[in-house]
Image: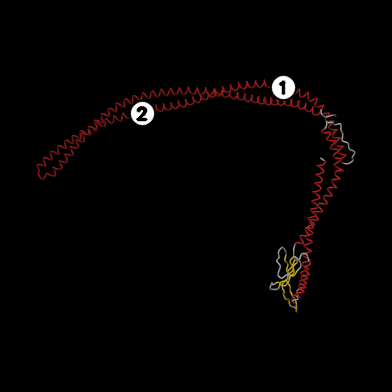
Amino acid sequence: MTSGLKTKLNLALILVVSVVLVSYGVWDVMRVEATETARQQHDITAAFERLETGLPKPLWDFAMATVDDILRGEMGHPAIVAVAVEGVDGEFVAGFSARPEVASIERMPQPEGVDVVSRELVYTGNGLENPLGRVSLFVSPEPLRQAVHEALVRNVLIVLVLNLVLVVSVSFALTRLVLKPLAGILTRVRDIAEGEGDLSKQVESDRADELGELAQALNRFIGSIREIVIEVETVIGGLSGTAQRTSDTAGDLSRQLAQQQEDLYMLTTALNEFSATADEVARNAALVAEAGEEAGTRAGSGLDQVRAANLSNGELAESVDQAADVIGELRQSTEAITGILDVICGIADQTNLLALNAAIEAARAGEAGRGFAVVADEVRVLSQRTQESTTQIQETIAGLQRRTEQAVSAMEAGRAKSRHSVDQASAAGQAFEEIDAAIKRIIEMMSSVATAAEQQSATVAEIERNVGNIQQVHERTVAASQTTSDSGEGLAASVTRLRALFGKFRL
């Protein structure tokens, strides 16, 4: 355990110190980079000032040796890898390069991997400014990168060295001042925890610091545990008897509840059968009442139909009487028509005779009576047709009279039957009224039976509900009894287990 704590503390210390030193290193690298950049920028600016001051006069005078000396003089800076002068038309004039060594060049160098900075060159003479071209410095970033790399390496070495020194120092101090005394206390505690459970042992420590206070607090804790164990052993002795009594009581209660459960089951079965019988009676009574109501409805309908038939028969009898009267009047009318037809036949005979006489007279008159003879022939023809029609009408009237007589006979028979039907319908109506009254009495009786059966079913349902509540209470009581029994057994087992566990302690 102490080695693990030591490792964790060392790792935490390394982490904290590394974070602080790395932060300082990052700041230092950034500072070096900014300082070197500013220094290089200052040197480049100073070089341009010198070139702008020294080059115009030699270039104007075309003193190329002086120009070369001035350009060579600027090659001493480590960041400047080349310098070149171009004319106004962009033509290369002079230049030097430091790669691989400082030497004059014949053409403009290529700006590969370097920064090119240019300034215009102007010669002022006789108050006039004469452009001469421009001078360009080829600046390499390598010196700046080298300075940053050196600062980075320096800071990494500082971090490693300081971490090593701090880890060694702190580990030594931690082991001597904390971990070694803590290991002694841990050994004593492990002896108590993994040994014979001897609570009489104490942790020995004469230190006056926090570790000494820890040892004293642990000794007080062991003493408290010892007192608790003594008290628990006393309580265990009392719990053992209580658990046995609880288990016995739960067993007796379970047996009594089992008998009560059987009685409740028999009562529930009887109530269910009684409820089923009452429901069956109620259903049958309801069915009889419904059948009676339907029979009453049909009897009432039959009574209404009988009454309607009786009324129809009465109306039919009246209609038959009226029809008989009409047929009698029809017979009288046919007899009157027969008399009229006899008169018409007589008139037709006279007309025929007159027409014959007229024809004879016309024949005597010769040509003068020809027209009259034609009229007489037409009159005679009409008279014959009238006689024929009258004969047909008489035959028709005779047939009508025969049928009228038959109708009168049928009407008389129908009148007798109609009156007999009226009498029978009246008797049937009286019988239907008696049936309807009897059905109503049956319906009232069945309604009373159904009401009584429903009340009986409701009473039985209430009893069943109460028995169900008793059953639920009984089931909960059984469950509670079983739980109590199980708890008693569990308590007894726990007491036995506690006695075995606390028996391991030596007081």
Q: CA distance from mark 2 to mark 1?
A: 95 Å
Residue 338 lies left or right of residue 194; in this view the side is left
Residue 394, labelled with which disc?
Answer: none
Residue type, numbered disc 2:
Leu
Q: Quadrant of the N terminus?
A: top right
Is residue 374 depicted above or below 226 in this figure?
below
Residue under numbered circle 2:
316
Q: Are discs 2 and 1 less than 8 Å apart at CB? A: no
Residue 491 locus on image (x, y percent): 75, 26
- Horizontal side of 477 relative to 28 (left or right) equals left
Q: Residue at x 34, y 29 (%)?
A: 319
Query: Of helix, strand and loop, which one carries label 1?
Result: helix
Local crowd at mark 1 within 10 Å, few (<14), some, or many (≥20)?
Answer: some
Instruction: Relative to 174, say whether 66 is above or below.
Output: below
Please tell me how many numbered marks the rendered image carries: 2
Task: Determine the residue located farthest toward the bottom in the rendered image.
Answer: 126
Whether residue 205 is visible, yes or no, is yes
Image coords of residue 231 (percent x, y): 83, 28
Image-based side of 183 in relation to 418, left or right: right
Which circle marks residue 251 in the picture?
A: 1
